[in-house]
Amino acid sequence: KQEVTQIPAALSVPEGENLVLNCSFTDSAIYNLQWFRQDPGKGLTSLLLIQSSQREQTSGRLNASLDKSSGRSTLYIAASQPGDSATYLCALSNTGNQFYFGTGTSLTVIP
Amino acid sequence: EPEVTQTPSHQVTQMGQEVILRCVPISNHLYFYWYRQILGQKVEFLVSFYNNEISEKSEIFDDQFSVERPDGSNFTLKIRSTKLEDSAMYFCASPTRYEQYFGPGTRLTVT
């Protein structure tokens, strides 16, 4: 069974800092990987999707990378802003069906 | 961006009562998923539904749970006799070939 781990569990940074969130997984035979943002008590907002044949995806200040051989993905956030404060979830699928989620990284950006 | 809707946003029920959670997925999507997130824990897969049949389910999805597509647009998750431990956020997801779009969730509180 796929196990997904996210480190750190919580992160606090001053505004303007660049940061990296980490996601590791045990089964490298993945179909795709998706990063989500979750605000307290809210739903899941999709940030970036990386298909198994891709190595990275970029959207604005966000960049996600995928290294299947090492079982890792990173989410890079450039020039962080207080509005980036949220929990970031990594999720992946082995078959294109159900997603396995990590426990998330809770990010606080201090003004 | 495609939108998935869920109702109600919050449901409070007494232990032992039946609840029905509703989801309207993205039009013309054939696959639907239900996930749940107990407060402070991972998002967990419950069940996937394809072409009016369950295609995959987790060990969480026991006989207390059922899914239906009562009409062409709605998609329901029924919990027959709720338990305290069923308190959670319940999300439906409507996938494309690679990406999952999540609804805003229903917060279920069992007292």
Image: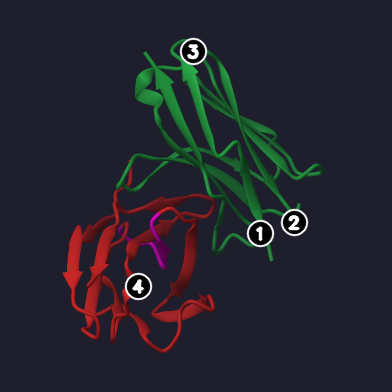
Chain colours: A green, B red
Label 3 element class = loop
Name the N-terminal-most of marks 1 and 3: 3
Q: Residue at x 40, y 61 (%)?
A: B38
Name the N-terminal-most of marks 3 and 2: 2
Query: How far is mark 1 from mark 2, CA to CA?
Result: 8 Å
Q: Residue at x 60, y 46 (%)?
A: A33
Q: Residue at x 55, y 15 (%)?
A: A18
Q: Tell me the quarter of the picture where residue B68 sits.
A: bottom left
User: Which numbered circle lies on residue B86?
Assistant: 4
Query: How far is mark 1 from mark 3, CA to CA?
Result: 33 Å
Please identify the quadrant where the N terminus of chain B is shown.
Answer: top left
User: Which numbered circle lies on residue A27?
Assistant: 2
Label 1 element class = loop
Whether marks 1 and 3 lie on the same chain: yes
Contact? badges 3 and 2 (CB < 8 Å): no
For residue A76, say whether it is visible.
Answer: yes
Q: Which residue is mark 3?
A: A79
**Which three-letter amino acid code belongs to the residue tagged 3?**
Ala
Contact? badges 3 and 4 (CB < 8 Å): no
List x then y, in percent, for residue A71.
75, 45
In this rendering, is residue B69 above or below A79?
A: below
Q: Which chain is mark 1 on?
A: A
Query: How far is mark 2 from mark 4, CA to CA?
Result: 29 Å
Q: Nearer the viewer, mark 3 or mark 4?
A: 4
Please identify the quadrant where the C terminus of chain B is shown.
Answer: bottom left
Contact? badges 1 and 3 (CB < 8 Å): no
**Which three-letter amino acid code belongs to the residue tagged 4?**
Asp
Residues in magenta?
A: B27-39
B84 or A105, which lies in front?
A: B84
